[in-house]
């Protein structure tokens, strides 16, 4: 009998590994609000300016030679700042000793650090934060287990503060030496030509359909920060399938760099949308590794990470192929120019070649995407989803997408056999957490393309992700969908999902009335048989339709500590329509204006201050309000609210009092366009009009005095949601009509 081990049990079994791999542990420093805590200003060190123009010229020359890594983003200042020779100490009322040092790199876009000495006792914490209020940490003794060095990812700004907190019982036990301060003259992943990203426009985000057949392999790829440069690399499986964190990248990325205990490996940095590219958290990271092998003849560097990626990283250990057989097609997964993760593919031909004396696979042409500096070390997979090499360099770019060279893994493997083991010419990838799966197990893992608020539209077109958690390929399944508990349809799906792989499926467009809804999607009948684990068959998503949408404007005059301020707008039932903050700190405070799309209803605005002193008085004269698009104030609030403030406001179509909702009845609704309007009791003449989702007038009419009903024929209109407005001398009523032919 097949056995299914639950993720909960697996997480419990892996608990020690998870703790040791976690880079940061949350919490708050003291010095980010030093003024409020009576702390002195941090001692500052001003580092020399750098010649950015000269650095960019050097980078361009390297790229012209086909050198794709490391992609340099920062200039390394070599320093020797310790707890004894730099910064200053301050003792808090609870006895904690706090050391702070502010580092200033003139005109830097970001700063990251390398610690050649990193010894933190139990209970002590290390934080980094910038003037905008962004905080990294807490870093602790568990952040880089087994090593006495440490590194951090770039933090935006030209000034960052390092803060070390030591409890009284551990006084004097910590040792820190900042050996490198990296002046970032590029912001990784940020550019001005698109919504987010600095790589070429032909690159393809991994969330796009091109990545659907490569979801596991995508999770094996990490962004590697080596001081002032970046490369890409891949987690490799071994014959024992035991999650040992072996990592493959390029020799030219690591050769001569001995600060490996402070390198940072960032997993799962991927855009949540295909187009436009959006940023994502970079918090799935591990610091430190051991160098096991560097091999120039195949440009391979083989590392052992300091910790195994924990279950919440959803790690995947890539399989490999050492047959030396030229593939029919290939895929590369990488971080070009230090950008968010991309996927690249070629249909061939793939031939043997050499670059700078290294034995390589030569990709003669890319058919989707490209590689760039920063892609170096990234894996190359054949059509069987097995890794066959890592990127050395080449000519390819968005404007000249030919000739990239990958060190051949089959020639590197004999040097790696002592670590990877001997188990034949091919090895499949390994996914921890999937242990002896059921024979047939289809799952719905996500619902996408449904905004939190659908504005000025009555329809959604959801995209769901199906995953095969079983042992057998799935060629058929039924996808069932319902809204607010009412079944709307069942769609047969045909295709092929191999075990542990996923595919994105687009559902039919659903037309819905305004309001808050629940979408429920489930998969059933895989291969016309029973599902071994029905617990993962269903996913749900709550959203709101605002059609027509009404614009509300939330305005804040912040105090100096914008990082303390957050807000949310909720429906009376508690659905969060919009949220905002925290914002940046500013010496003088500043104004914030944000537009929100709402429906014709009442809402609750809640403003919160993390410290509990509002947004005014001692640190600025802050206040806030909600106005409509005409500038009329719907809600006014003042900054002296302490920890939180809640107030109600309503979005109205007009200032004329509105009749009760029950006063205007329409049936059937939805209909094919023919509606019967039932009028309340004896009534005088009432003007009627119907508007579409954009507010355009599509029908007008008038009731007959004394009549109790009236036929409205909208059969000529397209499917959708419309607004019926009935207006008399003293009141008006509004009703939504749904036309569905």
Image: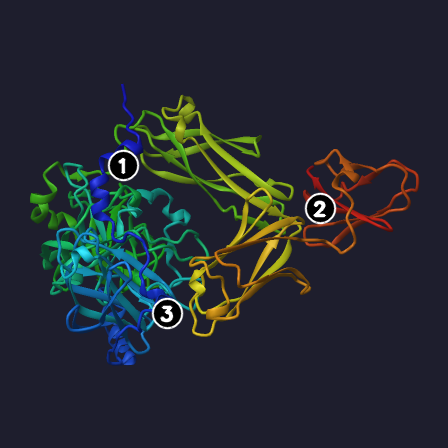
Tell me, for residue 11, which label it has, or none: 1
Nearer-N-terminus badge (2/1): 1
**Front residue of 723 and 297:** 723
Question: How would you rate the neighbour count of disc 2 (Cα within 10 Å): few for under 14, some for 14-19, many for 20 or more?
Answer: many
Location of the C terminus by quadrant is: top right
Task: Say which quarter of the image contains residue 661.
Answer: top right
Name, please, the residue furthest toward the front.
93
Secondary structure at numbered mark 3: helix
Q: Position of residue 25 (x, y in %)?
A: 28, 52
> What residue is pinned by disc 2?
722
**Front residue of 640 and 343:** 640
> What residue is pinned by disc 3?
35
Q: CA distance from mark 2 to mark 3?
A: 55 Å
Task: Say which quarter of the image contains residue 85.
Answer: bottom left
Q: Position of residue 306 (x, y in %)?
A: 16, 51
Nearer-N-terminus badge (2/3): 3
The mark closer to the camera, 1 or 3, is 3
Secondary structure at numbered mark 1: helix
Q: CA distance from mark 1 to mark 3?
A: 42 Å
Q: CA distance from mark 2 to mark 1?
A: 50 Å
């Amino acid at each position: 009998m097949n056995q299914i081990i639950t993720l909960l049990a697996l997480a419990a079994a892996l608990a020690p590994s998870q703790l040791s791999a976690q880079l940061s542990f949350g919490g708050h420093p003291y010095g980010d609000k030093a003024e409020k805590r009576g702390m002195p200003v941090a001692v500052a060190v001003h580092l020399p300016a750098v010649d950015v123009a000269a650095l960019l010229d050097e980078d361009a020359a390297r790229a012209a030679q086909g050198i794709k890594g490391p992609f340099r983003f920062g200039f390394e200042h070599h320093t020797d700042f310790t707890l004894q020779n730099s910064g200053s100490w301050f003792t808090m009322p609870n006895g904690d000793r706090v050391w702070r040092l502010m580092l200033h790199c003139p005109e830097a876009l970001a700063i990251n650090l390398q610690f050649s000495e990193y010894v933190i006792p139990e209970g002590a914490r290390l934080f980094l934060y910038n003037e905008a209020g962004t905080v990294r940490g807490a870093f602790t003794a568990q952040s880089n287990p087994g090593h006495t060095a440490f590194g951090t990812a770039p933090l935006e700004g030209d000034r960052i503060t390092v803060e070390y907190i030591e409890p009284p019982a551990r006084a004097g036990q910590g040792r820190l030496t900042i050996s490198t301060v990296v002046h970032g003259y590029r912001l990784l992943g940020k550019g001005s030509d698109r919504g987010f990203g600095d790589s070429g426009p032909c690159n393809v985000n991994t969330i796009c359909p091109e990545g659907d057949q490569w979801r596991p392999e995508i999770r094996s790829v990490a962004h590697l920060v080596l001081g002032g440069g970046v490369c890409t690399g891949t987690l490799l499986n071994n014959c024992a399938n035991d999650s040992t964190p072996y990592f493959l990248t390029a020799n030219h990325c690591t050769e001569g760099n001995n600060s490996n205990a402070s390198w940072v490996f960032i997993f799962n940095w991927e855009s949540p949308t295909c187009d436009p590219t959006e940023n994502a958290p970079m918090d799935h990271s591990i610091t430190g590794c051991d160098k096991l092998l560097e091999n120039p003849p195949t440009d391979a560097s083989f590392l052992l990470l300091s910790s195994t990626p924990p279950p919440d990283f959803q790690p995947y250990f890539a399989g490999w192929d050492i047959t030396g057989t030229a593939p029919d097609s290939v895929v590369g997964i990488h971080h070009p120019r230090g950008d968010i993760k991309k996927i690249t593919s070629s249909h061939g031909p793939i031939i043997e070649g050499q670059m700078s004396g290294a034995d390589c696979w030569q990709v003669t042409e890319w058919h989707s995407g490209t590689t760039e500096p920063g892609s170096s070390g990234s894996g190359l997979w054949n059509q069987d989803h097995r890794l066959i090499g890592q990127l050395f360099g080449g000519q390819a770019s968005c404007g000249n997408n030919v000739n990239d060279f990958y060190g051949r893994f089959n020639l590197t493997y004999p040097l790696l056999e002592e670590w990877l083991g001997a188990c034949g010419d091919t090895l499949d990838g390994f996914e921890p957490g999937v242990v002896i799966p059921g024979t047939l197990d289809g799952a719905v893992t996500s619902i996408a393309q449904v905004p939190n608020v659908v504005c000025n539209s009555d329809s959604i077109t959801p995209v769901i992700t199906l995953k095969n958690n079983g042992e057998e390929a799935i060629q058929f399944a039924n996808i069932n969908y319902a809204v607010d508990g009412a079944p709307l349809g069942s769609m047969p799906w045909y295709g092929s999902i191999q075990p542990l792989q996923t595919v994105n499926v687009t559902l039919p467009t659903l037309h819905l009335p305004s309001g808050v809804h629940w979408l429920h999607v489930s998969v059933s009948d895989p291969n016309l048989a029973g599902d071994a684990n029905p617990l993962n068959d269903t996913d749900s998503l709550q959203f709101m339709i605002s059609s027509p949408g009404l614009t509300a404007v939330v305005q804040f005059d912040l105090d100096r500590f914008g990082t303390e301020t957050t807000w949310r707008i909720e429906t009376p039932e508690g659905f969060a329509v919009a949220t905002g903050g925290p914002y940046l700190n500013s010496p003088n405070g500043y104004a914030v204006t944000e537009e929100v799309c709402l429906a014709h209803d009442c809402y609750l605005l809640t403003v919160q201050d993390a410290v509990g002193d509002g947004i005014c008085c001692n640190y600025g004269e802050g206040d806030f309000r909600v106005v409509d698009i005409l500038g009329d104030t719907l809600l006014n609030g003042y900054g002296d609210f302490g920890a939180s403030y809640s107030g109600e406001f309503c979005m109205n179509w007009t200032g004329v009092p509105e009749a009760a909702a029950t006063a205007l009845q329409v049936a059937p609704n939805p209909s094919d366009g023919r509606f019967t309007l039932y009028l309340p009791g004896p009534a005088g003449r009432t003007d009627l009009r119907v508007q579409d989702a954009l507010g355009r007038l599509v029908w007008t009419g008038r009731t007959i005095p004394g009549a109790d009903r009236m036929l409205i024929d909208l059969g000529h209109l397209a499917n959708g949601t419309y607004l019926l407005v009935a207006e008399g001398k003293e009141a008006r009523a509004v009703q939504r009509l749904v036309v569905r032919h």
